């Protein structure tokens, strides 16, 4: 059972978490709980490090920010004991939860679940600090922001759990964001692959890294609300889903910016020299369009809005080397995607998508596809219209609109 | 170098601490720094535990409250690195600083200073978390409130330090509390034994336990201000003090309450049955006075004011068993003490003390003595008068009054 920052925001919420844990234990289950820092706490601690020195030492940063989860595990263990349960807290170094030495963005190397399992056999609930680990040289490490979901999945694998329940402030994964699509439906079951696409396309319910880890080890995940008792969404193997729709969800991202290099020489190695110029900046959708009349081509790609100005600067300073005539750019764009494992076998999905968008007068600027998703880049002003019409077109609409928050 | 909570209260103060550490390193010294939690932080964390459950689990309490020091060591290490020093933080479990399993009031068992010493040899400043340790079964422990002074002395012993400097918000140990005695003088050198008496008699500069540990291992202590550059007070072996006064200081405590059991049977074992009744309540001064005319006696003793009501209740409920006729009690009393190793050889010290008090019309209610101190219990209203007249009588007055705070 994993609980994020809003679920443990104060002692009242922590008591609520403890009640949910007790219900699970009362059913006869062996439970490990993974918790985040109380909401706001990690930001406070990061702020202290930045105030100390903007270029803070990452080892010391991890020592400081990991205290957020340390406080929560202690408090939750106290409350569980108050309720009569046998419980104890586990910090990253106590399990141990061994990670790489990449402080503040460590990779998990090995988790020893044996002490926790030994505790289970004595009826003990393990209250584990998310987000944190320990390096082979006994320094505290952290997995990076949002790492607690990943901690929970990794721990579930290490203790050979039957399932990993991610409690959050929403009651499951929806076919689209209910704030944009009032008729979005909660999905009962979804495959790891679909969830991975949805997560990486901007649905913020689960951290991409945690879904990818769950997929690799076939760990069933459940996303459910810590505040209301509802069944939530199960993320599982594709084979375990009886009936699938062609399209499971419509995702979108506003964090997009488009850059076009006009009239670049159409020669081998040109794409490589462009992306070398961009260095660490992540490039997402890419399309190359040849002008028929001469030897030049246009190259269009997208970057996140945070990288937009820097990308333009770096490209402009390399204009002679790359040899482009002009840069066109636009950060009033967004990405809309349809996702579904059913697309593997169904035909005509892309046609339906483009027809629906065309019917609303929405121009598609860039397209990218994978086996189970199609993404299009469009002008940002059309975002809501596009998402809603695709949601309807692929039969995802609920009979009634979701109640406004 | 040990810095308490007010010396690391915010990042500006932490920068000040870092400058003091750098000065010491620049002199060519190898330095381990011990720090407390930022002031107010331990109270906040204790408050969270109490809010979770008044009868909180002490192991989890230690997990929670030890985060205060963890944050400070990380921040100080970040600031020291910013100043160009080689520095790293050390948590209790990393050294390791092994303690007993008495959570929230653990006793130090063994400290391994070898990794810290290895760091010294590479020019590294060790930034160590005070107050916390680790039990043999790898749980976090704490030494109890004010334990950071003890941590510092223990660590100084473990790394074979030449001296242990306790930085605080006062500039040294005074002959008496300057708020009561404006002519109190700062003491340049004082013996461990005298400091121990002063600390346990209510002078709050150093924790008693830390002085006792320093005395046992002959570790020289220095008490000095983290805010102004002044020489402070050195606490050292008696032999290292060239010239000693008969009386080094006048201490006092308001935390006193007096209880007298009137007309108890004067038989063997009666004192034992009284103090058994009081159980865990700590009894300080004791005097027994026999009435000449019959077989009964009166027994007077003092307890702290926090224990006063509970002591009276417990005695009243055992009145038949003990067999007293009446209880007289008074919590408007205080204890005034003179301390000095010179009293071992000087004569007439007690006479001087009683004569001075009598001259001011102050009635002495109870007396207790050790080799190097004499304490008297008096009515609280006379406290300032008594302390000032003894300070003058034993030649401790400075030529000028201390500037008001």
Image (tube, coloured by chain):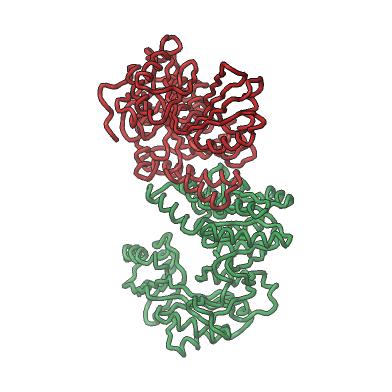
Chain colours: A red, B green
Q: Up-down: is B68 above or below A72?
A: below
Tell me where residue A282 sits by quadrant.
top right
In the rendered image, is residue A162 in sight?
Answer: no
- Closer-to-camera residue (A279/B309): A279
Which x, y percent locates residue B107? 56, 54
Q: Residue at x 32, y 65 (%)?
A: B316
Which x, y percent locates residue B143? 53, 54
- Closer-to-camera residue (A57/A117): A57
Q: How many marks?
A: 0
From the viewer's perspective, is B110 left or right of A67?
right
State which quarter of the image contains the N terminus of chain B: bottom right
**Furthest-front residue in view?**
A293
From the viewer's perspective, is B405 left or right of A99?
left
Q: Residue at x 39, y 17 (%)?
A: A353
Which x, y percent locates residue A60? 59, 46
In the rendered image, is residue A306 in sight?
Answer: yes
From the viewer's perspective, is B36 left or right of B335?
right
- Closer-to-camera residue (B75/A311): A311
**Furthest-left residue in view?**
A400
Tell me where residue B237 sits by quadrant.
bottom right
């Amino acid at each position: 059972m994993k609980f994020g920052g809003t679920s443990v925001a104060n002692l009242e919420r922590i008591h609520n978490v403890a009640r949910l844990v007790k219900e699970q234990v009362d059913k006869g289950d062996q439970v490990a709980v993974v918790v985040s820092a109380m909401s706001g706490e990690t930001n406070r601690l990061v702020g202290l490090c930045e105030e100390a020195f903007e270029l803070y030492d990452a080892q010391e940063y991890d020592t400081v920010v990991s205290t957020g989860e340390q406080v929560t595990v202690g408090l939750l263990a106290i409350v569980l004991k108050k309720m009569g349960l046998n419980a104890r807290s586990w910090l990253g170094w106590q399990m141990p939860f061994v990670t790489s030495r990449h402080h503040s963005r460590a990779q998990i190397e090995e988790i020893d679940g044996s002490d926790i399992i030994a505790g289970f056999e004595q009826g003990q609930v393990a209250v584990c600090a998310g987000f944190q680990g320990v390096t082979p040289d006994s320094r505290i490490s952290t997995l990076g922001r949002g790492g607690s979901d990943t901690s929970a999945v990794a721990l579930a694998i290490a203790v050979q759990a039957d399932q990993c329940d991610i409690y959050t402030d929403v009651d499951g994964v929806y076919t689209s964001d209910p704030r944009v699509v009032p008729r979005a439906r909660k999905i009962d079951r979804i495959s790891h692959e679909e969830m991975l696409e949805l997560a990486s396309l901007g649905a913020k319910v689960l951290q991409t890294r945690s879904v990818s880890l769950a997929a690799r080890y076939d760990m069933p995940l459940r996303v459910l609300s810590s505040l209301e008792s509802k069944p939530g969404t199960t993320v599982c193997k594709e084979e375990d889903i009886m009936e699938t729709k062609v399209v499971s969800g419509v995702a979108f991202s506003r964090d997009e910016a488009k850059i076009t290099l006009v009239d670049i020489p159409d020669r081998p190695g040109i794409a490589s020299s462009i992306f070398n110029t961009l260095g660490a900046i992540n490039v997402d959708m890419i399309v190359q369009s040849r002008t028929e009349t001469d030897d030049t081509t246009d190259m269009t790609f997208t970057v996140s809005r945070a990288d937009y100005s820097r990308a333009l600067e770096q490209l402009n300073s390399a204009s002679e080397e790359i040899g482009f005539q002009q840069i066109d750019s636009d950060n009033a764009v967004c990405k809309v995607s349809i996702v579904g494992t059913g697309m593997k076998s169904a035909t005509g999905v892309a046609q339906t998508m483009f027809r629906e968008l065309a019917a609303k007068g929405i121009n598609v600027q860039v397209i990218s596809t994978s086996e189970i998703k199609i993404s299009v880049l469009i002008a940002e002003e059309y975002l809501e219209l596009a998402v809603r019409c695709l949601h309807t077109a692929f039969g995802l609409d609920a009979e009634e609109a979701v109640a406004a928050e």
